[in-house]
Image (cartoon, rainbow, N blue to C red):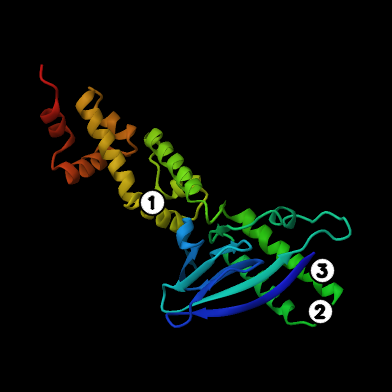
Amino acid sequence: MIRFHLHGYGEFDDARRIGPCAWPHFDLLFIHAGHVSIRLGGEQRGGEDIELRDGESVLIFPHTPFRGQSIAPSSRASVQHFAIEGRDRGAELRPPFDDLAKLRRGFRAYGARAGRRVEGDIARAMRLSSVAPSPLLQQMREATLTLILAELGDATESREVDAGDAAGAAANLDAVIAWAEQHLDRGPTVNDLAGRAGLSPSHFRAVFARRVGRSAGAFLLDLRVREASRLLRETRTSIKQIARAVGYGDVAALHHALRRRTGLTPAAYRARHAPAG
C-alpha cells in the first residue's frame, strides 16, 4: 500500500535551506517559483548536483542524502513524502508504484514540460492531505499521486541514477561525448547532449562542467574547431564541405569560429599549415 507522510509547501532563501537529511521514504519536490540547487548523495560517494527552476521537479528515492538552497532570493516549492509498503494481501502493486518499490538511493530529475498541468494536481494533493482520513480518501490520494507521476514521466525526459555511483555517471557522460565526436555533421547542441544523457539541460550543464572542467558549450566549440583544423591541414576537402562536416550551417560560421580561436581564416590556416611539397 501507499503510506502518505508530509505534504506541504515551503519557502527557501539564505536563512531557510533544504536539509541536510535522508528520508526512509520517497520525496517528490516540485519548484513552483524560483531557482534552487540540490546536492544528492554524500560528499564522499560522488553525489550529484542539480538545479531546478519553475516547473521542474525531482523524485528523491529512500535513504538518499540530500541538501539544498535557493539560488534566487526566494524560492517556493511543494513536497510530497510517501512510502511504498509491501503487497496488499498478495496483490501486485499498480504502476508506477510496482517499479518505484524496487528503487533505493538515487533520484529522478524532471524537466518543466509537464509544468503547470502538474501544478494543479499537486494543489489537489495538498487539499486532500488536509482532509480527515478514510478508505475513500486513501484511494483518491493514491489516484492523484499516480496521475502526477504519470504526467511527469510521460511529458519529460528523466534519468534514474544511484546518487552514490559516480563511476556510472562518468561512463554515461563519456558515451555522450563519444557520440558528439562521431556526429559533428549533425550540429549537436547542448540540449541534444542533455537529451542523450537523460538529463534536463540545466542538470547536464552542471554535471558536465564539474566532471570535464569547462562548459558543454565550450566543449562543442573546441570539438568543431579542432576537427575543422585537422581537415584543413590534412585534406583537400573544400572549406564549404568542412563547415558542414563539423556542424556549421555555412562557411561564415566556420570563418568566425576559427578566426576567434587561431586568428586566421580557414584559407589562411590551410595555407600556413599545408604540408611542404
In the rendered structure, are the residues bearing label 1 and label 3 in contact, judged by CB atoms less than 8 Å apart? no
The CA span between labels 2 and 1 is 47 Å
The residue labelled by disc 1 is: 211
- In the image, what residue occupies the spot 86% across and 73% down? 135
The residue labelled by disc 3 is: 139
Determine whether, in the image, residue 107 is placed left or right of residue 103. left
Residue 133 got which mark? 2
- In the image, what residue occupies the spot 66% across and 71% down? 81
Q: Quadrant of the C terminus?
A: top left
136 is higher (above) or lower (below) than 132: above
N-terminal of the pair, mark 3 or mark 2, is 2
Q: Quadrant of residue 131?
A: bottom right
- In the image, what residue occupies the spot 79% across and 60% down? 86
The CA span between labels 3 and 2 is 10 Å
Q: Helix or strand or loop: what does disc 2 sit on?
A: loop
| Amino acid type, callout 2 | Pro
